[in-house]
Amino acid sequence: MNTRIERPLNVLDTEKVNPSTTAIDRMSPLEIVQVINAEDAKVALAVQQVLPHIAGAIEEIATKLRRGGRLIYAGAGSSGRLGALDASECPPTFNVPQTMVLACIAGGSQALDQAYEDREDSPEAGQADLASLAVSGADAVVGITASGRTPYVRGAIAYAKQQAALTIGLACNANTPLEQEVEIMIAPLVGPEVITGSTRLKAGTAQKMVLNMLSTGTMILLGKTFGNLMVDVQATNYKLQQRALSIVRQATGLDEQAARTLLDATGGEVKTAILVAQSNISPDQARERLTAHGYLTGAASPCPGVWGCPPRIFSSRAHRTRDNFAAALVKSEGHINYQAVTIRRIERETWAYAQLHRWDDPGRAGGPGANGRLLGKYSLAGNYRPDSTPPCWEHHPVFA
């Protein structure tokens, strides 16, 4: 890693002069906020251009975390603070251990509320911070730097690579040194800032949006939501207690008093309460099922011993291949063969479905025939569309 021989700073898009704001010091307050708002409107479009990269990163991060690894952010200045913010919000939102999502910032924790801009120039500091966390091949490391060249971040990524960790870069410029050093690069190109070089503005907004997606998308894949309900919320204050009550009511249809009684009986555990109501089992039985499955949907309708219910219906691989999703034949303990066939574009390609067929003949490997019956249809969004089939069959490994 050479941090000295690089392009001049002023050739980076985020360091260029924005022609729309050269007269901003002569604008009225209303004109100032109008031009800032107009520039901010470009951020979501820039992020939209890199959604496939974000989705790929989510899939890989979820794989790491599912196997016991960690998600670690490394950044300096505003970028580092955004990483720390995202990491700090995962435990209360998704009830994950404090050690699952971590953040390193140049200058340490004191840099969270004070600027230590000189600390970002040390790649050795980035390496040391990652080493202090005992980073390994089980982990995913995201280097966050608007310029794509910050030495602290690149040092952290270099160390992560040495330890065989998954490396992901998040920058707001193209063709950066960081891009050459990571496995997955996410680079929303937001263009010149309202105030030249002030990357806490559009670049910071883009980084926050991407980090929201990375952590939220990962947690969804890990089963931390039920539909779009925050079922793993830690109800540690009055507002969150009211939210937990509302979630239980929405998921179960119970009235307020019944939902409150159920939450009390389950120690305030939202996911446990929902499963108790849905499956008519005890809180301890619900906890056992959740421990076994990890996912509320699978735990609510456990399979009858033929296979374990894995967490996902479609992987992004299936999404990417959509029409070309090859027929996948899976043998479950030699009892039943299943085959996923046909993914079609429907309604302007906004979603697609696959058909799952069952054959009573374990040896059958052909397509659906007279002795096959349709079990169900599945949308890429993960919505189960039953056709005379138990809900748990949506979790067959062919969709994992």
Image (cartoon, helix red, strand yellow):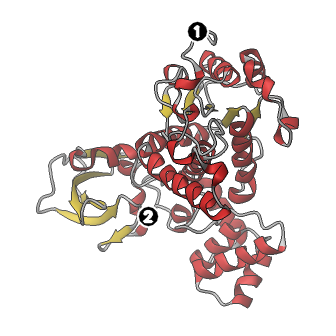
Q: Residue 232: x percent and y percent?
A: 68, 62
Could you say where residue 29 lies in the image, as x and y percent from the top left?
67, 62
For label 2, count other residues whose C-alpha is less than 10 Å away and answer few (under 14), some (14-19) or many (20+): some
Which comes before the other along the chain, label 1 or label 2?
A: 1
Quarter of the image for residue 5 reads top right
On the rendered structure, is 85 left or right of 319? right
Q: Nearer the viewer, mark 1 or mark 2?
A: 1
Tell me the tag on residue 5: 1
Query: In the rendering, at what x and y percent does residue 370 appear?
Result: 11, 63
Amino acid at circle 2? Cys
Secondary structure found at label 2: helix
Seen as rendered, the residue at the extreme right is 110
Question: Which mark, residue 392?
Answer: 2
Q: Residue at x 59, y 22 (%)?
A: 9
Please name whichever residue, 361 or 209, is drawn nearer the observer in this view of the structure: 209
| Residue 111 left/right relative to 40 | right
Q: Secondary structure at mark 1?
A: loop
